[in-house]
Amino acid sequence: MDENQKLQFIKANFWKKVKDTGKKIPFVRDVIAMYYCLLDEKTSLTAKASIAFALLYFISPVDAIPDIILALGYTDDAGVIASTLLLIKSQLKTEHYEKADQALSEDKEK
């Protein structure tokens, strides 16, 4: 899968995964901010590659620990997201979190 295909897969599947899991995971705000960081033209290619990997892992139905296992299902996703956040923290801007907050508030209104 090339970079363009990865981005298209993320765009096509991201919001469904967030909607399906958003209430179950405490790090959903970070995941959404990372999505907006990935789409930002100012984000470095290295950071975009790291974010793409993390979001692909988050979206993918194949996990090290299946998401359906209560209490443990999202621990592997959390580890990947947390590690990626450390790697890209200089690229993740306030505007990305503002967009994440807006997306979350719009979802609550529905």
Image (cartoon, rainbow, N blue to C red):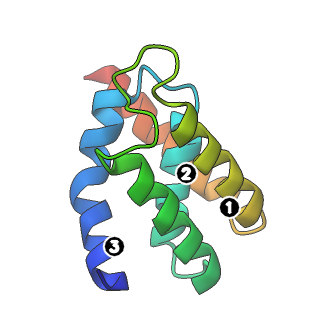
Q: Is residue 68 left or right of residue 25?
A: left
**Residue 1, percent across and down?**
29, 80
**Residue 77, percent across and down?**
52, 41
Secondary element type, mark 2: helix
Which residue: 52% across, 81% down? 41
Figure check: 33 above or below 108: below
- Give the CA distance from mark 1 to mark 3: 18 Å
Which residue: 47% across, 67% down? 52
- Give the CA distance from mark 2 to mark 1: 7 Å
Q: Is residue 46 left or right of residue 24?
A: right
**In which quadrant of the rendered image does the C terminus lie?**
top left
Mark 1 nearby-residue class (10 Å; few <14, some 14–19, many ≥20): many
| Mark linked to residue 71 | none
Amino acid type, callout 3: Leu
Figure check: 101 above or below 60: above
| Mark linked to residue 92 | 1
| Mark linked to residue 7 | 3
Q: Earlier in the sequence, mark 2 or mark 1?
A: 2
- The answer to the question of whether label 2 and label 1 lie on touching residues, with beta carbons closer than 8 A, is yes
Q: Is residue 18 left or right of residue 12?
A: right
- Give the CA distance from mark 2 to mark 3: 15 Å
Q: Nearer the viewer, residue 5 or 104?
A: 5
Looking at the image, is mark 2 or mark 3 nearer the viewer? 3
Which residue: 69% across, 60% down? 93
Q: Residue furthest front?
A: 64
**Residue 74, percent across and down?**
49, 30
- The answer to the question of whether label 2 and label 3 lie on touching residues, with beta carbons closer than 8 A, is no
Residue 51 in view here: yes
Amino acid type, callout 1: Leu
Q: Earlier in the sequence, mark 2 or mark 3?
A: 3
| Mark linked to residue 33 | 2
Q: Is residue 8 left or right of residue 45?
A: left
